Amino acid sequence: MSHVPFADAQAAFPFVIAQGRNIETRIYKKRYPTYNYAQVIPVVTEGNQWAIGTTFFSVDSAGEAKFLSGSGTDMPFNKSTKDMASHDFAMIGSGWEWTIEEINQASLYGIDLSATDAMSATDKIERMLNGIAFVGSTEKNWTGFANDTNVPRADVDTAGTFWPAKTVDAMLKDVNDVLSRVRTQTNEIEWADSLALPPDAFRRLATVRLGAGDGAMTGLDFIKKGNIYTAETNQPLNIYPVRELATASQDGGGRMVAYRRDEEVVRFHLPMPRTVLQARQKSIMGFEQGIIARTGGTEWRLPKAAAYADEVTAPPA
């Protein structure tokens, strides 16, 4: 590419637009494996991306069936009740800038405009979405996956011992206890098919070996084979490490979350995934571009289809 001198920002604008499109393509190609909210929580992108929020209805019914006589008049009738709830959306954003000096230098040396700032803005968007998904937003008064007060909680049977020092059998008992709580608190209706753990607890399971350490099975293998969900349904239990759970318990320690991973139970509202805006001239020698997204945070629609188990790992020193 030959050097094209740009005397002013207006003359450089077509170059900026072309470069902005290249950066936009690179942004959408980039993946962020460290931000695993979409793996742990069902992400819902339905609805208009500019909607104020979402409204939904929950339905419950009461009634019974019983034996009747052919001449009886005591037919039992069922009654349905409907509750309406709403959830608001909000916009987040992050941007970057270029100067006429940077644009002319890029043209002079035949190189692309630096995408470092653009990638940094993308990272900030994903980091914020990840944080909102797991712990909510105090500014918006939102809770998240790890700290919703509607989800039933209880401490694991620590007896002063946390997972890094527990036996595999003791850890399996903690897992089956929290899976059982989902069953009992829903009258045997719901099954928790997923388990989210603090990173230290997950690493303990993944590295400890059974017996004297000469076996091939790890604690993670043992939990996957010996949990009550798999035993009764013959389906695998999903197990995820979530760093936000390391300090999520009431005492600042590790929290384990058992839940049914289904958008009927819990969902992360993302009506507008990250969207790159058109570059624009902001001053006599400068340009700017940005990324926006719209989210409603994490919503527990069936909180009793989940359970928190606290004090899995110790609070940070």
Image: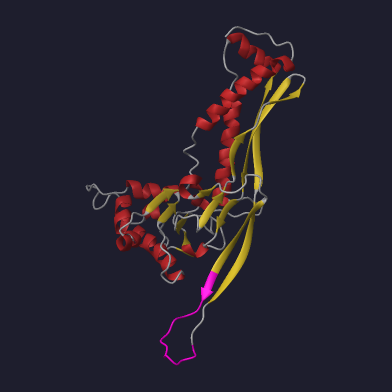
Give whichever of 24, 59 is nearer the camera.
59
Q: Which residue is drawn at 52% across and 73% down?
A: 61
User: Residue 124: x and y, percent?
Assistant: 59, 36
Residue span colored magenta: 60-74
From what the image shows, is residue 283 above or below residue 261? Answer: above
Q: Which residue is drawn at 26% across and 52% down?
A: 210
Specify whether residue 73 is painted magenta: yes
Total numbered circles: 0
Q: Quadrant of the N terminus?
A: top right
Is the stretch drawn in magenta largely helix, strand or loop?
Answer: loop
Give whichever of 143, 295 is nearer the camera.
295
Q: In which quarter of the image is residue 68?
A: bottom left
On screen, residue 151 versus residue 68, left or right, reads right
Give whichever of 56, 195 is nearer the camera.
56
From what the image shows, is residue 210 above or below residue 184? Answer: above
Q: In which quarter of the image is residue 290?
A: top right
* Residue 152, visible in the rendered structure: no
Q: Residue at x 52, y 52 (%)?
A: 247
In this view, the residue farthest toward the right is 284
On screen, residue 136 versus residue 162, left or right, reads right
User: Residue 122: x and y, percent?
Assistant: 58, 34
Specify whether residue 103 is painted magenta: no
User: Residue 26: x and y, percent?
Assistant: 53, 27
In this view, the residue farthest toward the left is 214
In this view, the residue farthest toward the bottom is 71
